[in-house]
Image: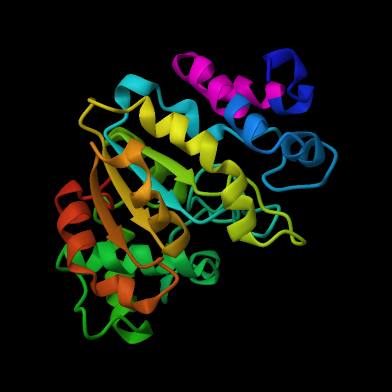
Amino acid sequence: MPANTIPPTILDALDLADASWRPILLEGLAAVAAANPGYLPALAADNYLPTGQRLFAAFALPLPAVRYVLVGEGPYPRAESATGVCFMDGAVGDLWSEAGLSKPVNRATSLRNFMKMLLVADGQLSAGDTGGAAMAPVAANARGNGSIQTLAQLQQNLTRHGFLLLNAALVFRPHVPPVIEARAWLPFLQVVLASLAGTGAKLVLWGKIAEQLKKLPECAGLEQLCAEHPYNLSFITHAGMQQLFGPMRLLRAH
């Protein structure tokens, strides 16, 4: 499908992506259209998350800067939360409260468990005790010792380490199952992943939907790290994720 036949609102969303990605994203959209010609026109005529033309917001990170591709399931199912960037809940500002993690963080279950995993990896929290009583002194320490204070700072630290924060499904619609939405975007992701061949980028897959990408030939040359989705409590103690993220010290302010 030529670019001039892709719905204009979809094309306009490319403005939030870095210029280095534009030809690749156009090729990816053409692949989506070739596989399912009615998908993009139907999407453009529908209401979906993220709003605000943030469909490709994750691609603000320039292609040469990508060292990791973190893939989750799909956008948060709340307009204020879905940002177009995997796992970054737009409803979250402050990370900490006097009692532990802030209420918005605790509401975003996946983010809460990711934060606790980072704290365990950093030795600030015991893997066997991550409840409220254990979190209170950790939070008190974090609010005054040079730790990051906001989700925006966490996203900046992830970006600094070269994380492209994607979802297997770029959109959320309440009447479309996430697995169906992800299937429609699979040709797009194949083009994106093919563009990273030979770069040394690593693929970090969270959850069963994202894990399906392991089967793609485009992933054969990428090192792959898999974990259950962070909305599972067991993610907090995932040794592979602790080994990956621990040395990055993502909770430290820069």
Q: Is residue 209 magenta?
A: no
Query: Does residue 206 lie above or below 59 as drawn?
Result: below
Q: Main secondary structure of the magenta part?
A: helix
The picture places residue 249, in percent across and down from the top left corner, at 20, 50
**Foreground: 19 or 108?**
19
**Foreground: 236 or 218?**
218
Q: Residue at x 25, y 49 (%)?
A: 224
Q: Residue at x 38, y 69 (%)?
A: 113
Answer with left or right where residue 192 lies relative to residue 68. Answer: right
Q: Residue furthest right?
A: 45
Query: Does residue 182 lie above or below 164 as drawn?
Result: below
Answer with left or right where residue 47 lies relative to residue 23. Answer: right
Q: How many marks?
A: 0
Say which quadrant the C terminus sits in: top left
Q: Residue at x 58, y 59 (%)?
A: 179
Q: How is the image coloured?
A: rainbow
The picture places residue 77, in percent across and down from the top left corner, at 66, 60
Q: Which residues are magenta?
A: 11-29
